[in-house]
Amino acid sequence: FLLQRAEESVARFSMLQVAEILCRARQAGCLDQYFIATFADHASSNISLIPPCAMTQMVWAVGTCGSLDEFWMFMMAKEIQKDATVFSPCQLTLIAKVYSDAALEDPDFYASLVEAARKEFDSFATPQM
């Protein structure tokens, strides 16, 4: 019952606010599977509305917490894959690192990141390569 009430309340948040909440919870060390589940339906319903900065924050928060949610990571990967060129070099680097560190495998996803990096190769700093 409480989870249902929480999910109803979550619908009032913008996706930028959700990203900020997830990041703060991750930084505080309290981002667990229940916390993530509370936002999952809202995020999946609005995934196409998530701007690149918020998507990057969500990837970092969900992908580096101790309660990795593979479905949410897959969902974000497919959205990122649609047009990875909208992400900055810094964002692409972080996204690639988080997915790689989490050992999530999707050759098409990684190919889209590489293609986006190739198109903006001169914009990448040496440490980002």
Image: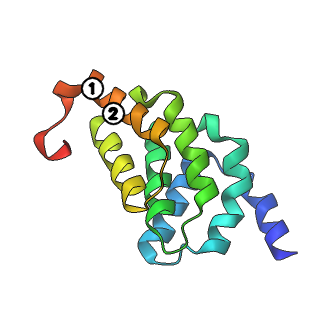
Would you place residue 77 above or below residue 119 in this image?
Answer: below
The x and y percentages for residue 119 are 29, 21
Residue 88 visible to an observer of this rendering: yes
The x and y percentages for residue 23 are 47, 62
Q: Quadrant of the C terminus?
A: top left
Residue displayed at 19% across by 34% down = 124
Would you place residue 22 above or below residue 1 in this image?
Answer: above
Q: Amino acid at mark 2?
A: Val
Would you place residue 99 above or below residue 52 in this image?
Answer: below
Would you place residue 69 above or below residue 74 in this image?
Answer: below
Please say if the residues under marks 1 and 2 sit with CB atoms less than 8 Å apart: yes
Residue displayed at 73% across by 43% down = 45
Residue displayed at 37% across by 55% down = 100
Q: Which residue is mark 1?
A: 118
Q: Secondary structure at mark 1?
A: helix
Residue 87 visible to an observer of this rendering: no
From the viewer's perspective, tell me whether residue 84 is left or right of residue 17. Answer: left
The answer for how far apart the CA atoms under marks 1 and 2 are is 6 Å
